[in-house]
Image: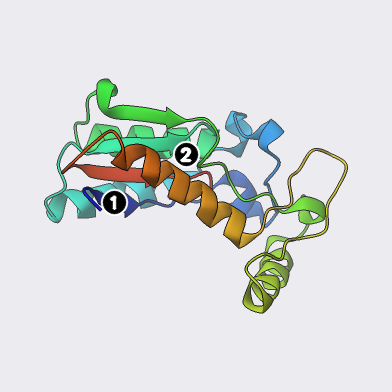
Amino acid sequence: LRNHYILFRPGETTFEAAGIVDSNPINKQSTDRGLTTKGRTQVHRSAAALRAQGVETPTIWFDTGARAIQTADIIGRELSVPRARMEPEFRWLEARGLGALEGTDLREAMNTIHALDAEDIDNSAEPTDDGTPNDSVNDVFSRLRNTIAKIESSYSGGDFVIVPGDA
């Protein structure tokens, strides 16, 4: 690879704090699904750690959901990244859709997803009819690979912070 990549998880979100699965992309821009106070603190601390490791003015690619936008904005302010180096990615960094697990208990859903993933990287949660995708871990990796390929084809020698819609 010609660039240096840092995957940056969004801080804690409101639904995460409440222990509820929130993966339907139709709701992703709602600020009700943004970062909690704890989540903002987590991002500030992690951005400071990046600065301490010598990461300065990276290009930030981020999902267009509230939690990723808020995370990217904090990173940008902490590292003095100009707006021209903030790149929204409208599809490839979207959160993993958890299908029929949408709105259920987060801990139980994660146990189910981890078991499915351990069995086969192409497994996914059961589908639903509410518009929530049911992505496999392989689907998520494919989208991330597409994002990196897009960056690699246009840039060389830079630091890139990638903020997906979820972990």
Can residue 11 be seen here?
no
Determine whether, in the image, residue 126 is placed left or right of residue 140: right
Residue depicted at x 43% and y 42%:
147
Q: Count the numbered circles shown.
A: 2
Q: In the rendering, at what x and y percent does residue 107 appear?
A: 68, 67
Q: Nearer the viewer, residue 166 or 122?
A: 122
User: What whole-number distance in Å separates the C-alpha atoms at marks 2 and 1?
Assistant: 17 Å
In the rendered structure, the answer to whether residue 167 lies left or right of residue 137 reads left
Q: Nearer the viewer, residue 19 or 98?
A: 98
Which residue matches tag 2? 68
Q: Amino acid at mark 1?
A: Tyr
Image coords of residue 1 (percent x, y)? 25, 53
Near mark 1 (Cα within 10 A), the count class, few <14, some 14-19 or many ≥20, is some
Residue behind mark 1: 5
Q: Residue furthest front?
A: 153
Query: Residue drawn at (47%, 39%), measured in percent from left and top?
Result: 68
> Is the residue 81 above or below the residue 163 in the image?
above
Q: Which mark is residue 120?
A: none
Q: Position of residue 37 (x, y in %)?
A: 46, 44
Front position in the image: 32 or 4: 4
Residue found 43% across the figure and 52% down from its top: 9
Image coordinates for residue 99, horizontal then vertical, percent: 77, 51
- 82 and 106: which is toward the camera: 82
- Amino acid of disc 2: Ala
Q: Residues within 10 Å of mark 2 (few under 14, many from 20)?
A: many
Snapshot colouring: rainbow
Q: Is residue 112 left or right of residue 156?
A: right
